[in-house]
Each structure stands twice: as C-alpha cells, then as structure tokens.
Amino acid sequence: MDDLVKAVLAFRDERDWRQFHNPKDLAISICLEAAELLEAFQWKRPEEIAVFLAEEQNRRRVGEEMADVLILLVSLADVAQIDLMEAARSKLADNARKYPVERAKGNARKYDAL
Amino acid sequence: MDDLVKAVLAFRDERDWRQFHNPKDLAISICLEAAELLEAFQWKRPEEIAVFLAEEQNRRRVGEEMADVLILLVSLADVAQIDLMEAARSKLADNARKYPVERAKGNARKYDAL
Amino acid sequence: MDDLVKAVLAFRDERDWRQFHNPKDLAISICLEAAELLEAFQWKRPEEIAVFLAEEQNRRRVGEEMADVLILLVSLADVAQIDLMEAARSKLADNARKYPVERAKGNARKYDAL
Amino acid sequence: MDDLVKAVLAFRDERDWRQFHNPKDLAISICLEAAELLEAFQWKRPEEIAVFLAEEQNRRRVGEEMADVLILLVSLADVAQIDLMEAARSKLADNARKYPVERAKGNARKYDAL
C-alpha cells in the first residue's frame, strides 16, 4: 500500500495536478467511478454475474473500475490529511463492536435492528 | 494492506456473512458509501471545506466514510477474485500512457482532448 | 406538473433558499437522493422486492425518495433555465431513433450493439 | 406530465421492454444517470458553471441527462405502482412542516438543527 500511495502521488505531482485536487471534486470522482463500477453489474441476475466474472477480460474491466476508486481514495486521503489504513482499521474495530459475533452470525440485519 | 484484507475477511467469516456478499449488492454498497462520503462536502464552498477539514473530528468522520468504501472494495475483490493492488498498479501504468507528462503537465483536460 | 413546479419554487422562495441553490450542489443532491432510493432495494432479491413493494408503507417510503429526486430536478431545471418536460420529450424522440422498434423489440442490448 | 407518462410507457411497450424493468435495476439506472448529470459540473467552480450554462448546447446536454433521470422515475413509478406526482405533493407538504418559514428563512441548516 505504501508503494501504491507513493506511485499515485508521484503520478499526480509529475503532472502538476495537485492544484486541481480539491476534496469536493475528488469525492465527486469517487462517486462517479463507483457508478461506473456498478454499471458493470447492471441488468444482470446473480447467475449471469457469476458467468460474467468467470471471464478474465470482465474481471479485468471490473478491476479497472475498482482501481479508479482506490486511486481516488488515496488521492483524497493525501489532500485531506487522512490516514486511510488507520481509518479502515478503526472502522473495522467499530463494526466489530456494533455487530457482535454472537448476535450478527448469519444475520444480515442492520446493527440497530439486531 | 495484506493485514487489512485478512481482517476484513475474518470479520466477514466470523459472522458467516459471505453468503450475503454477492458482487452486485457489494457494488451498490460502494456507490451508497461513496454518496455518504460526498455528502460530507455538499453545500460547502472550497474555503469552507478547508476550515471543515482542519478540525480533527471532521477528518475522522470523512475517514470513516472513506474506510467504508475501502473495506467494501476489499470485500468485492475477494468474491470477484480480483487482485485489487495489482489492478491499481496496472491502472496507474495505463494512466501514465494516456497522460504523458509533457502534454498533461498542469493541464486538467481529459486524455482524448489533450 | 406546472402546479408542482410552482409549489417547489414557492417553497424555496418563501424560505429565501434560492441563494443556496447552485447547480453543482443540486446535482450532488440528486445523486445522494438517487442513492437513498437505491438503498431501499439493496440486499433484496427480485422476489423479495415484489413482496416489499406489495406493502403500502414500503411503496410510500420509495415514493418519498423518488419525490426527493423529482423535486430536485425541478429545482435544478429552474436555476439552470432548462425546460425539463421539453428535454424529456426530446430525449424520448432521440431514444426512438436509437432504438428502432424492429431491432430493439424484446432485446435489452445497448443501441451501439443492436 | 400525463402525456410524458403515456409516451414513456408506449416507448417501453412497443419494444417489449417491460420484462427487463425490475425495480432494482431501474433504481440503479437512476443512480447512474444522476452520476452522469453530476459529471457535467465536475471540476468546475461556480463562476465556470455560470459560463458553462450560458451556452445553449451545454444546457441541452445537461437537459438530456436530467431527462434520463425523469424518464426512469416515470418507468419505476409504473412498475412499482407509485403515483409520482402525488408522492411529490405529499413530500413538499412534509417538508413544509419540517422547515417552517419563520425558522428556515435564509437558513441552510437541516431541519433537526433548526
């Protein structure tokens, strides 16, 4: 991950793009790329998605959309001065408190309905 | 990142939630969490966002929304059998080809308008 | 529709909210409300959605989210000086050209793959 | 609006597309089209958006994206058996209760912070 962060920021800085990277437009970009990712699955039933993802070129396309989201998260974390990995660890710990194993096991309900 | 992937999958499997994790609904979740992230910046002008992000509790809130997106990317990568880090490296290499430094420097135009 | 437009703009102007209604944040709002609408169907299989929508209170909730999107479209059309109904008629005519009945009948493919 | 609803449903039924119109995928479509609408404003500052919308061809493009959202709302309302105009009127009445003029005037705060 450290290498990815370095590569993403080097890519940006070599092109002098830091000036365009305001947090609001980066967050908009994350939304738009998340929509493109979702588009890959639109109009497909679960069985069709299994067939779709069995093909390597489709997995590659989906991987590209996921990569766009991840690269933008790294960019936003930098300009907003947020430690993304620490935030993820902390969120997982919160989730573990909200969804104790004994009550959440095999149960898809939201924490406030557990 | 490896540790995060392990923690995300352990969290899921301890709760027996793999059964609910179909790719389409995970992609929907990524969209919804990306929308929540964007909501943090809505109705704010750039100067207001700088002030907003200067406060630690706001950075923490934004970090939580970003963490939700990252955790879901990791979950989707697992069920879709996609190597997320490899996809990100590959996408950065593609972007480097589409946006050569000499033409993209200081220039926000899209690659097809460079 | 004319009555709805009048009611939406009167609601806004009585509260002196025109000053906050810039096109970009209204477009963000449309995205966020569309995400809330989608959330109503998340994690549900087609059969579950049929059962869900058979209940009046669920239809009312979904209707509220759809109403939010429509009200925001009306608000954006006003500040951007766009005739929404005319745009919709014109778009339907374009779609009719892109998807001729004889080729599109019973066929979900995109126009460029017809 | 009645004419638009008739035209949207006639377009769909002439192509025998009712079979593809499940509520979940229509809600996904609304999200994706809302994202395309937002894309028109991405990376633009408020002053740039005013210039952008002063040009008729840009207003037409934005109008097309708004039309896509509206047409999909009409389609979803039909399959979900929701009266969209009634839902909008009812939502406006709710909003009027949540945001009384005397407290909301010139004030962008959310109803629970008024």
Image (spheres, coloured by chain):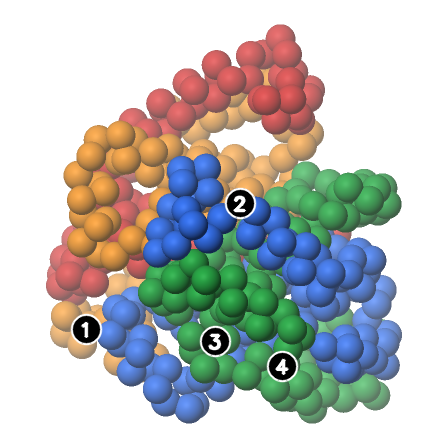
Chain colours: A green, B blue, C red, D orange
Q: Residues within 10 Å of mark 2 (few under 14, many from 20)?
A: some
The x and y percentages for residue B37 are 48, 69
Residue A78's label in the rendered image is 3
Badge 3: chain ID: A
Q: Residue C34: x percent and y percent?
A: 48, 53
Q: Is residue A50 above or below residue B72?
A: above
Name the secondary structure under disc 4.
Answer: helix
Q: Amino acid at mark 2?
A: Lys
- Between the C-alphas of marks 2 and 1, the distance is 45 Å
Disc 3, SS: helix
Q: CA distance from mark 4 to mark 1?
A: 37 Å
- Residue type at mark 4 is Met
Name the residue tied to disc 4: A85
Asked if labels 3 and 4 share a chain, the reply is: yes
The residue at the point 48 percent across, 76 percent down is A78
Distance from the alpha carbon under mark 3 to that under mark 4: 12 Å
Q: Residue at x 69, y 20 (%)?
A: C106
The residue tagged 2 is B98
In this rendering, the label closer to the viewer, 2 or 1: 2
Q: Earlier in the sequence, mark 3 or mark 4?
A: 3
Q: Quadrant of residue D71?
A: top left
